[in-house]
Image: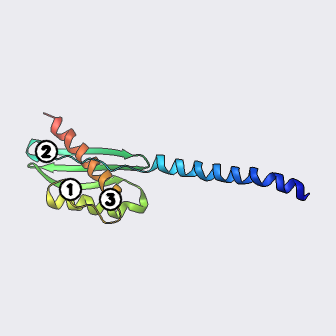
């Protein structure tokens, strides 16, 4: 019996290392990326409500941006990861207050901030494209 165990140990170690390597690889592949957030000229955005979506690997944000008189009058975070919803709403509020996408990311939630900012940018681009 001891002989069988001695022969099995290298196989068990190899299997454990391969399993750990696979988990690490999946984690790296699913990790959200930093996004480049552009600027939008609000004077070019028509009045209305616009939906913006951004998927950053496992992070997903859907926002509704309301524009009146070339100003952002409200941003509603429609969908986001529940554990980061508070931070998503904070960044949306900051954009609304600043009337700009150039706001500081929420500390500890940079990737969430980037995903929400990109969704807002996408919504404003949709408003910019309409006549």
Pointer 2 residue: 47
Q: Where in the figure is residue 1, as x and y percent of width and height? A: 91, 57
Foreground pick, 37 / 24: 24
Marks 1 and 2, how far apart at CA:
12 Å
In the image, 35 versus 68, the foreground residue is 35
Which residue does the numbered mark 3 point to in the structure image? 110
Which residue is at the far right? 1
Q: Position of residue 48 (x, y in %)?
A: 17, 44
Q: Is residue 43 left or right of residue 63?
A: left
108 over 48 or under it: above or below? below
Q: Position of residue 111 (x, y in %)?
A: 35, 55
Which residue is painted at 30% across and 53% down in the image? 114
Residue 95 point in image, percent of width and height: 20, 57
Tag count? 3
Closest to the camera, between mark 3 and mark 1, is 3
Pointer 1 local density, CA inside 10 Å: few below 14, some 14–19, many at least 20: some
Q: Which residue is disc 1 drawn over?
A: 74
């Amino acid at each position: 019996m001891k002989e069988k165990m001695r022969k099995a140990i290298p196989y068990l170690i190899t299997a454990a290392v391969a399993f750990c390597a696979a988990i690490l690889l999946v984690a790296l592949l699913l990790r959200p990326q930093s996004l480049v957030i552009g600027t939008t000229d609000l004077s070019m955005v028509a009045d209305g409500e616009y939906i913006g979506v951004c998927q950053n690997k496992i992070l997903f944000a859907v926002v509704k941006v309301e524009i009146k008189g070339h100003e952002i009058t409200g941003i509603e975070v429609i969908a986001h990861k529940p554990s980061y919803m508070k931070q998503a709403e904070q960044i949306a509020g900051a954009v609304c207050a600043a009337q700009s996408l150039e706001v500081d990311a929420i500390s500890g939630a940079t990737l969430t901030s980037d995903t929400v900012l990109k969704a807002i940018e996408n919504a404003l681009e949709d408003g910019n494209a309409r006549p």
